Structure formats: structure tokens, C-alpha cells
Amino acid sequence: MRLRDIAGQDQATALLLRAVASGRIAHAMLFDGPDGVGKRSAALGLALALCCPEEPNLGCGACDVCRRILAGQHPDVRVLAPETNQFLLEQAKEVVALACSRPHEAPARVLVIDQADCLNPSAANCLLKTLEEPLPGNFIVLVTAAPARLLPTIRSRCQRVRFVGIRPAILIELATRRGIDRARAETAAAMAGGSAARLFELCESEVESNLWTVASRFRQAAAASEMGPIFDAAAAFSDKEERQDLPEALALLARFYRDSLALAAGADDLVFLRSHSAEMAGPADLCQRRHSLMPLRRAVTVVLDACSGLAANVNAVTALEKMMMDIRSLAVEAS
């Protein structure tokens, strides 16, 4: 993956490309940000830019050197991950030994320590001197989603490069390029939390359709003329196994109400779940009352409160009953 091809990380990749072009790249770097946003790919992209003979400072991604780097077969580019739940001292010593020698064949050696927050204290302390002053031509990249778990002495020796969650519009584009249906891509992007890895995981599973089924069930129960459907819909989640996808289903429901609010306010360009906009424009429930902006805004809060309750181990059935009753009251208020 070339640096210029990494989606949604323009600031981080531009910083790295400028550093490579100027020859002022730090010998130790810390790539931090959420999981699945391209940190490890950027570390390999940096290796391409430093080692590629065809397009120096950029990386072509197609020459023999680039292909071997991407396949994990180049002797001067190593990606190390914890063998157990933590990096052991022996792995840290391997990094030290490599960083104290010259590259075998490329102009630079890049050592990537993936999940660097798994470094145990002994392994971390073993790396300190090497991070501060490796042999010229060696570059060490620590990759982590939890930088606070690293020792301060490790962080202080690295140049920090921050990666951010990928914007939903970019995630949708990534998915549709792979031939994924736009409706599925929109839902997956809404639930992915800015992670491309999570996006494709959702697209390749049946979770996406299940989430809509659950969210629609809650809406229909809250719109019913009697209270029975509310109790039935909530009771379906009394079993722990059934609650596995519940947080994401509620997040999707909150997104749906948010989009309904945007549509009701006339801000159609802000609607994210465009493939479901028809459901936001009919006469069925709270979402479709175009004049009722305040109840829709409060509905988003009601659903997010239920999410917070579940995260705090509030009884799921009770939290769902309250959520649907509150939405039902808001619908009555809007009528």
C-alpha cells in the first residue's frame, strides 16, 4: 500500500511524504489512532517510499522490491507482532540486533512493531537506547491504538503521527469500489466507527441486515397503538446471546432518527442513510412527521441514553422498554 493510496489519512500521509522527500524522517515514529484506519498500511507505505528503486520517496508498489515488501518477504522490512498477549524480551532483543546493523540490500531498513502497546516493561526498557539512536539507515515504527499504555519514556523517543477515523463518505466509496451494494455500504459505514477493517467485516457478514431488522422492530413497536408490542420487542433481548448486536442496532436507530431530523429540517444533503430516505418521508411514525423537529432531536437522545444504559450494565429489557415508551410519547406529542 503506497502512502498516497491510503484513504482518509491525508494529513498523516502528507507529513510522512514530506519527511521522506526532505530526508528528515525521524528514526523512531509512533503511529497511533483507532483500529483499522490504515496505520500498519502506512508503515508499509513508508517502507515502500524509503526502499523503492523505481520511484524513490514515493514507492511504485509494482517493482520486485515493493512486491517483496508487501508480501512480507523483504529482509530489510520486518513487521513484528506479539506472539502472545504481550511482546516478550526476546522479541525486543531481535529489534535491537537488527537496528544495530546495516540494511542488507535496500537503502533503509524499516522495523514495524505492531500492537506496540503490548510491550511489557522489560521489552520496552530494552528498546529505549535503540529508539533514541539506532544505526543510521534504520527506522523503527511503533503502531498502536492505545498510546497511553506505552511507557512515557517510549513515547518521548518517538515522533508521533496521528491517524484519525475515516469519514463515512470515504468508507462508502471504498465499499462501492469493491462492488458492494450502496445500501449495505451506507449501513456498514455508519456502524464502522471510522474503521475500514470493521467496514468490510460488516459488509461481508449478515450483521447489516440483522441490524435493520432490529431497528425496524423497535420503531414499529413504538408506533403501535397498544403497549404489548413494546414489551414483546424488549423481551426478545432477555437472553444474553440475543444482545450481541444490540448496541450497533441502537446506534443505527439513532443514526436513522438523526437523518430523519435532517430531512425534516430540509437539510437533505446531510442525510447519510440515503438508501432508506423513503422510510423517513411517509406517514408511519415519529420519523415521518416533517414538522416535528424537537421530538426527532429528543428521539436521538432517548436512543443514545439506552446505549449508555446498556454500556453501564443496566437491565437490557428495562432499558429497551423505557426507550420505546419514550419514543411513543414523543410521537404522541408530535401528532
Image: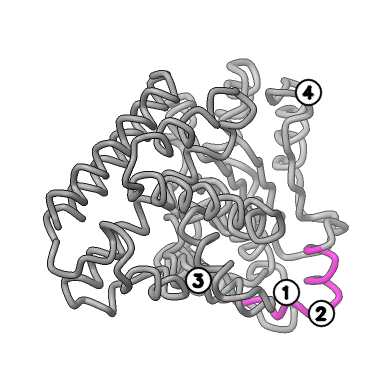
Alpha carbon distance from label 2 to label 4: 33 Å
235 or 45: nearer the viewer:
235
Residue type indicated by callout 3: Leu
Q: What residue is pinned by disc 3?
A: 17
Dot 2 corresponds to which residue?
A: 63
Are dots 1 and 2 in contact, CB under 8 Å?
yes
Q: Nearer the viewer, mark 1 or mark 2?
A: 2
Q: Which residue is mark 4?
A: 90
**Secondary structure beneath label 1:** loop
Is residue 57 at least partly visible in the picture?
Answer: no
The amino acid on which the numbered mark 4 sits, given as a three-letter code, is Glu
Q: CA separation, marks 1 and 4? A: 30 Å
First in residue order: circle 3 vs circle 1: 3
Under mark 1, the amino acid is Cys
Q: Residue at x 29, y 68 (%)?
A: 283
Q: Is residue 81 above or below residue 263?
A: above
- Disc 3 versus disc 2: distance between alpha carbons? 19 Å
Q: What amino acid does circle 2 point to? A: Cys
Closer to the camera in the image, 156 or 129? 156
Q: CA distance from mark 1 to mark 2?
A: 8 Å
Q: What residue span does the magenta drawing correspond to?
A: 57-70
Q: Is residue 88 left or right of residue 142?
A: right
Q: Position of residue 93 (x, y in %)?
A: 74, 27
Which residue is nearer to you in this view: 296 or 21? 296
Sequence-first disc among 1 and 4:
1
